Image (spheres, grey):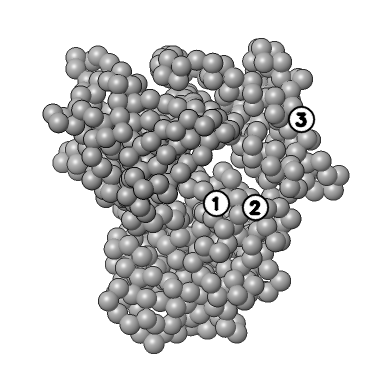
């Protein structure tokens, strides 16, 4: 009997996992004996929340360059190259601007992933793998029953059914409310972007200053005006008649804007000191004091990469707390828009000359290696890492497209956008009688009739996990209970299985972003989907190869027709 595998969610993480599984099965002798069912709540599988039309405004840009997107059936550049002019125009892309270092609208990446998903499903079927794609279908709950995993399925407009599988991959992705306006004028997220279209031209506060907040600001701006670039000059912004009262304030603790994407070599040049092997060794040697020793390796690597930068900030004498102050210090002492303009000009010059800033590149290459220590830190170490080192890594790898910076500068010059530093002593009050929120900073009250939480996906507590029976059966457990720290989310091992004494946990893979972010803070974006997919795809292929399935897919209703 075929091994039955269920994927819950049909975004990029499932796509990359399915791709890895198909490739691994192709190396096995004989016909792959697998039956795969992919459940997707939305009507169109294969897009993913960050790239879905309607959920995203056409003006919203992704912040991953084409060259960084791991290929599937084809690369993004090859896919764009074979699209006709009408489709490119509909996606907001000029053919002359197609380049491996370019950034594209989120909805364009959505169409790319949709096409890749369709090709993957067809490729699997040609290899003899049964694949069923079930759109508009919610997995209500999951329960371990004997040697099987029982899924409670709720198809749209059909009776609920029960189906059994041998393995389940949870790839439910970002978790946002379908209606973001939870009280008049207060939005828990900027998605779906279509909800922002109903916001009038008024005073709007945004908590956040990263790409999520930039997306929200740009969506509001294009709803009430337009960006223009004439005769090759600087980008400008002009309000529509009657919409002049739009005023946006972006807020964050430090009051800083992200920096512009910087030129660097891809694939990464290998590290020489703060390597994966070195970090793994200090984790496994049992000597403890992991953060201090890992930071010492980090500091040595940075010193070797850019001695001038290390000397300028006196790196050799800096603890993590002091390094954080030095890293952000210069920027904090300059008007954020002046810094943005200077940094953008530098980034453009470096791209034109293919010049890499060594210290930026070193930090970028080290963020994934340093992330290896996070699941092993004790309470105090984790707090120090989260407060002082994580913001540096995020700031360095979450640089944004040059066009995004140009849009912010244009809005500021049009007196439509400001940035405010919240500091440490602030409070957001969303429970007053008037709409929006009151932001209290050092005792001073600032009222915003519309306020949008735009800080991106945050880790969620295990009580928000969508499959409660797995919690009741202690298959899925609170990371704080099993890993000794007050961290949000689900405890997982290095193969993404839930941490549990129950052997059934070995048949579940948890790749649901909001529930693993707490202990794996950098597992966001397409490259993470690819890396997780490689691990889980290989594990599933091995399981299919070495053991027979315990049971076929059993259901009281027939699966929906394949796409």
Q: Nearer the viewer, residue 254 or 112?
A: 254
The residue positioned 71% from the left and 29% from the top of the image is 320
Classify 10 Å Cα crowding around label 1: few (below 14), some (14-19), many (20 and above). Answer: many
Q: Quadrant of the C terminus?
A: bottom left
The residue positioned 54% from the left and 55% from the top of the image is 460
Identify residue for label 2: 487
268 displayed left or right of 11: right
Q: Is residue 427 above or below residue 411?
A: below
Circle 1 SS class: loop
Identify residue for label 3: 296
Task: Confirm whether residue 63 shows in the render.
Answer: no
Identify residue for label 1: 459
In x, y percent, where is residue 64? 43, 37
In x, y percent, where is residue 88? 22, 39
559 displayed left or right of 68: left
The residue positioned 53% from the left and 72% from the top of the image is 468
């Amino acid at each position: 009997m075929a091994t039955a595998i269920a994927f819950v969610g049909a975004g990029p993480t499932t796509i990359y996992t399915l791709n890895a599984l198909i490739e691994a099965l192709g190396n096995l002798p004989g016909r792959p004996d697998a039956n795969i069912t992919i459940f997707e709540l939305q009507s169109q599988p294969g897009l993913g929340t960050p790239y879905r039309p309607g959920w995203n405004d056409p003006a919203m840009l992704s912040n991953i360059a084409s060259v960084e997107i791991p290929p599937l059936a084809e690369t993004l550049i090859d896919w764009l190259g074979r699209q006709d002019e009408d489709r490119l125009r509909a996606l907001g892309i000029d053919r002359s601007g197609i380049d491996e270092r370019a950034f594209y609208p989120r909805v364009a990446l959505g169409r790319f992933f949709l096409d890749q998903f369709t090709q993957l499903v067809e490729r699997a079927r040609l290899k003899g793998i049964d694949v069923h794609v079930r759109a508009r279908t919610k997995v209500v709950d999951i329960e371990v029953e004997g040697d099987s995993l029982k899924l409670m399925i709720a198809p749209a407009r059909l009776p609920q059914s029960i189906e059994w599988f041998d393995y389940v991959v949870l790839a439910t992705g970002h978790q946002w409310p379908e209606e973001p306006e939870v009280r008049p004028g207060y939005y828990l997220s900027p998605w779906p972007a279509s909800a922002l279209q109903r916001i009038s031209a008024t005073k709007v506060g945004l908590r956040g200053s990263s790409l999520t907040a930039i997306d929200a600001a740009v969506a509001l701006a294009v709803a009430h005006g337009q960006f223009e670039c004439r005769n090759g000059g600087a980008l400008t912004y002009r309000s529509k008649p009657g919409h002049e009262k739009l005023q946006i304030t972006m807020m964050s603790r430090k009051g800083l804007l992200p920096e512009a994407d910087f030129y660097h070599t891809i694939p990464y040049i290998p590290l020489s000191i703060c390597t994966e092997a070195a970090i793994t060794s200090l984790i496994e040697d049992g000597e403890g004091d992991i953060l201090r020793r890992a930071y010492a390796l980090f500091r040595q690597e940075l010193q070797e990469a850019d001695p001038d930068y290390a000397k300028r900030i006196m790196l050799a004498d800096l603890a993590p707390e002091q390094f954080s102050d030095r890293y952000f210090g210069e920027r904090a002492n300059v008007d954020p828009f002046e810094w943005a303009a200077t940094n953008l000009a530098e980034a453009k010059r470096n791209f034109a000359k293919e010049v890499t800033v060594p210290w930026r590149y070193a930090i970028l290459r080290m963020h994934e290696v340093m992330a290896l220590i996070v699941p092993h830190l004790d309470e105090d170490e984790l707090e120090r890492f989260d407060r002082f080192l994580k913001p540096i890594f995020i700031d360095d790898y979450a640089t944004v497209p040059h066009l995004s910076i140009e849009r912010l500068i244009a809005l500021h010059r049009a007196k439509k956008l400001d940035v405010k530093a919240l500091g440490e002593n602030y409070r957001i009050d969303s429970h007053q009688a008037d709409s929006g929120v009151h932001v209290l900073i050092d005792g001073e009250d600032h009222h915003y009739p519309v306020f949008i939480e735009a800080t991106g996906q945050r880790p969620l507590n295990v009580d928000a996990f969508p499959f409660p029976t797995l919690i009741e059966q202690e298959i899925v457990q609170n990371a704080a209970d099993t890993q000794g720290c007050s961290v949000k989310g689900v405890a997982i091992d290095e193969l993404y299985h839930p941490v549990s004494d129950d052997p059934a946990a070995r048949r579940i893979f948890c790749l649901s972003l909001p529930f693993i972010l707490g202990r794996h803070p950098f597992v966001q974006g397409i490259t993470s989907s690819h890396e997780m997919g490689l691990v889980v795809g290989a594990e599933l292929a091995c399981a299919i190869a070495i053991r027979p399935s315990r049971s076929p897919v059993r259901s009281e209703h027939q699966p929906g027709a394949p796409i």
